[in-house]
Amino acid sequence: MPIKVLPSDLAAKIAAGEVVERPASVVKELVENSIDAGAGQITVEIKAGGVELLKVSDDGHGIPADEVPVAFQRHATSKIDSQEQLDAIATMGFRGEALPSIAAVSRTVLATRQPLESAGFRMELLWGEEVSSGSQGCPQGTTVEVSDLFGNLPARRKFLRSSSAETSRVQELVSRYALVFPAVRFQLVVDGRTSFTSPGNGVPREALLAVYGPQAATAMLEVHAEDEANGYQVDGFAGAPSLTRANRTYMTFFVNRRWVQSRMLSFAVEEAYMGLLQVKRYPLASLNISMPYEDVDVNAHPAKREVRFKDESRVFSTVQRAVRMVLVAESPVPMLTSPNPEYAAAPATSFFPRSAFGGARSGGSALEYPASAPPDAAVPRRPAPPLKVVGQLKLTYIVAEGAEGMFLVDQHAAHERVLFDRICQKIAQRESQSQPLLGPVPVELSPAQTDTLKTNREALENYGFQFEPFGDGSYLLRAVPAIFGEGDPARALLDVLDMTAFEGLVRQKEDVTAASIACHGAIRAGKSLTEPEMVALLEQLEATPNPHTCPHGRPTMVHFSSFHMEREFGRR
Ligand code: ADP
Ligand code: MG
């Protein structure tokens, strides 16, 4: 066949295939347009899975009558008009492809009225061609009605799943947007019945309640972490470790409130739950990561489902730490074997109306709760249980026995916790932490280390380091924190700087420095400990206010309950 340019209707159909895969993708584009139009209320209505009818109405700012036909042209958008704007996109849309793509594969009717206009405008298209247009009275905002979707693309229509499967994709989509836009009131009507509404009052936890139902919503922990220096922020909810799923679909991510799919982000969340979940179980999470627009390229996928990050590893660690911090703050000793009973006992709040959708979900099998907690599994949160040393394992863990079973204590993490608390206490009591060196020690710093040293200078000095510039990336070290004892002082400073840089994303400066110092000073894995040393370490750990986690948020100990051991050995 000779090469020739495709007829425009065929080209439009092909292009539409990229944007409009199924009813849910149409809903996504239309809802995003409504959000971009500043809507406070968005109603989505579908019939027969969205194939027969799919309608999205909003109360946004509408479209000027004379611009409506333009909106249906390829690459027509009011949202960007220059390369600079493409590099820092703040709106959901920007490609100008949704309306023409949707219109190319359906019968589309758009009606719109701007707030100050008395009349609105209506335009109807069939398979991308205008059928009629003209002024018409209508409420403020925009309504797009799409019917007979893929009527001219039988292959695409065959590829759709059952109408209930397509319906649930639309439900999932609407509920995800409701989570990240709590100030917008969403309503979803399926085959004439309201299936979901969100309150739209701007309170994230109430949007969560509407989506997940009261039972699961109570077991969701609020995540909020900021990294002011880089303008990153993580907000949302993460499920308590007791609330798990058999796959990853309950992890939802938004980047600057744009719903994205990202394996990397799922991994970051899974990492945060490390040691807290059983194998093959996955957490629930709904997180929005805000970052400067120029740090993320949203123009990476035709349906805008994927994004590219300028600094992927920073995003990864910011998310992982944000979630980990919440889990650690809320979690008692992680139990390796049975689900944590503490969350299962969380009362179901009854004063919030349970939506049909949320109720169906939380009542179904989608979410799982431990049916009843084993009677002896309740580990007191604080203080640490008194523990008896049994021995050391792999020169890394202390095996100990407690009233509730067996505990494995990570010697490094435990010692870190002890030192961290000691450092903080000395600071609080204004005691000197410093240990002068016999002679000044020159230390060479990389530019990154110099940077960390300068930004954290005050904290480093408070905690016992004394140093002065010695020309060109070098410093003279005169004192180190007293807890370091005999070790190599230069190594100590370099270690603490590297750790501070690594930890410094979502935590307070002082905390980071103290944690880094504690980490450097703590006994390492691989060191043989005598029994009196282990006893002393456990006693010191028990005396700290947060014995269950190290200052970086990792657990200091894991617990194998007597109940579980008995069950494993067939005694129960
Ligand atoms: P994009 O969103 O990428 O700009 P679309 O094809 O989705 O492209 O929409 C084209 C234009 O139509 C938008 O830029 C916007 O100006 C206008 N528009 C579409 N939907 C709405 C709406 N619900 N409210 C107001 N304006 C809208
Ligand atoms: Mg759009």
Image (spheres, helix red, strand yellow):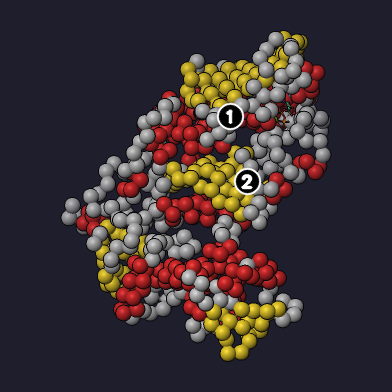
Circle 1 packing at 10 Å, graded few (<14), some (14-19), many (20+), is many
Circle 2 packing at 10 Å, graded few (<14), some (14-19), many (20+), is some
> Sequence-wise, which precedes: disc 2 or disc 1?
1
Depth check, front residue: 164 or 66: 66
Q: Is residue 312 at least partly visible in the picture? A: no
Name the spot of residue 306 as percent of width and height, x first. Answer: 63, 42
Q: Is residue 227 left or right of residue 9?
A: left
Residue at the farthest bottom position: 438
Q: Is mark 1 on a helix, strand or loop?
A: loop
Q: For the residue marked with disc 1, what is the amino acid?
A: Val
Depth check, front residue: 568 or 18: 568
Question: Which residue is the site of mark 1?
Answer: 184
Q: Is residue 337 at least partly visible in the picture? A: yes
Some atom of ligand 1 lies within 8 Å of the CB belonging to the residue at label 2: no
Name the residue located 59 percent from the left edge and 69 percent from the top edge.
459
Q: Is mark 2 on a helix, strand or loop?
A: strand
Q: For the residue marked with disc 2, what is the amino acid?
A: Ser
Please identify the quadrant where the N terminus is shown. Answer: top right
On residue 315, which mark appears?
none
On residue 290, which mark appears?
2
Name the spot of residue 138 as percent of width and height, x first. Answer: 68, 12
- Which picture quadrant has residue 476? bottom right
Name the residue located 69 percent from the left edge and 16 percent from the top edge.
111
Depth check, front residue: 357 or 383: 383
Name the spot of residue 434 as percent of width and height, x first. Answer: 54, 79
